[in-house]
Image: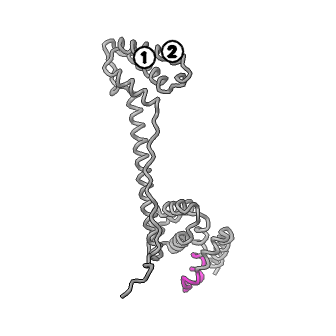
């Protein structure tokens, strides 16, 4: 038995490469404040006052050098020494500085923790959308997309596939979503999901779903192939398609 040459290969696009999450840019001012707080921990008012004088001296020296005038970290360190000096001035005589009991520090830490949690949630959601986009891409290439039930968040996966394609409209994905929306399949069985879709899907998909719904009510026995033209109409002129869907809906209601 001979092997055909060249050997057959299944044409399949590779999945989109994963991109590492961008690192948060360094904040010199925040670094400066943290350095001061570490140094000041356990200092009494006299020690903090001495450190403040040193910081003021450094600031005066830096002001003489053009490349050090706009020094965000230096300004932040000086401002933090001044704040801690004022804090201890209002505290009991024998008080030492403790960032763990500093309301300003604790508020900053709480804000940073909340921001980090939000960022982590955004990254998890982006990863979930990318994974679903990979899955939909594989299903469309296997020819089994139409048998797939849409899920919550597939609108974002659709946008991700369009982004990967450089803005090119994913006609098969749009047609699948339009048919699912019209038939109330998958998560579109929930009226809230259908209502939300109006703000998540582009107008051609919504017009396609509306026209399909109207035609299905008028001609319940219509075969899927007979309704395939609705997707092309919606893509060509979504506004006119939506108007036609509204007209057909009124005609059905008047029966």
Magenta residues, start to end: 212-227
Evaluate if marks 1 and 2 touch, with contact meaning CB atoms under 8 Å apart. Answer: no
The image quarter containing residue 26 is top left
The reply to whether residue 189 is visible in this rendering is no
Q: Position of residue 63 (x, y in %)?
A: 54, 17
Q: Is residue 3 left or right of residue 210?
A: left
Q: Residue at x 52, y 72 (%)?
A: 176
As measured in the structure, the alpha-carbon distance from the residue carrying label 1 to the one carrying label 2 is 21 Å
Residue 69, how many percent across, how many down? 54, 22
Residue found at x 36% / y 13%: 45
Up the image or down, 68 lies above or below 93; here it is below
Q: Nearer the viewer, residue 74 or 189?
A: 74
Judging from the image, what secondary structure is the residue with disc 1 in?
helix
Quarter the N terminus occupies = bottom left
Q: Is residue 217 magenta?
A: yes
Closer-to-camera residue (242/78): 78
Mark 1 sits on what residue? 86
Mark 2 crowdedness (10 Å alpha carbons): few <14, some 14-19, many ≥20: few
Q: Say how many tags the image has.
A: 2
Q: Is residue 30 above or below residue 57?
A: below
Which residue lies under the disc numbered 2?
60
Q: Nearer the viewer, mark 1 or mark 2?
A: 2
Q: Is residue 19 left or right of residue 167?
A: left
Identify the residue shown where x is 43% and y is 49%. Answer: 21
């Amino acid at each position: 038995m001979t092997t055909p040459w060249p050997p057959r290969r299944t044409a399949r696009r590779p999945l989109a490469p994963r991109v590492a999450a961008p690192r948060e840019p360094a904040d010199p001012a925040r670094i400066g404040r943290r350095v001061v707080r570490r140094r000041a921990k356990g200092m009494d008012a006299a020690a903090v006052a001495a450190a403040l004088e040193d910081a003021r001296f450094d600031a005066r020296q830096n002001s003489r050098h053009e490349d050090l005038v706009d020094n965000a970290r230096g300004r932040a360190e000086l401002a933090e020494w001044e704040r801690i000096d004022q804090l201890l001035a209002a505290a009991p005589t024998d008080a030492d500085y403790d960032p763990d009991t500093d309301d300003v520090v604790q508020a900053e830490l709480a804000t940073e923790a909340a921001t980090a949690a939000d960022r982590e949630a955004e990254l998890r959601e982006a990863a979930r959308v990318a994974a679903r986009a990979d899955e939909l891409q594989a299903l469309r290439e296997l020819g089994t997309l139409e048998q797939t039930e849409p899920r919550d968040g597939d609108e974002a996966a659709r946008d991700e596939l369009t982004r990967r394609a450089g803005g090119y409209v994913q006609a098969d994905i749009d047609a699948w979503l339009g048919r699912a929306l019209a038939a109330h399949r998958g998560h579109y069985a929930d009226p809230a999901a259908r209502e939300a879709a109006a703000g998540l899907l582009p107008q051609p998909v919504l017009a396609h779903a509306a026209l399909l719904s109207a035609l299905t009510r008028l001609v319940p026995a219509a075969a899927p192939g007979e309704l395939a033209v609705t997707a092309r109409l919606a893509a060509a002129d979504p506004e006119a398609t939506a108007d036609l869907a509204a007209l057909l809906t009124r005609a059905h209601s008047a029966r």
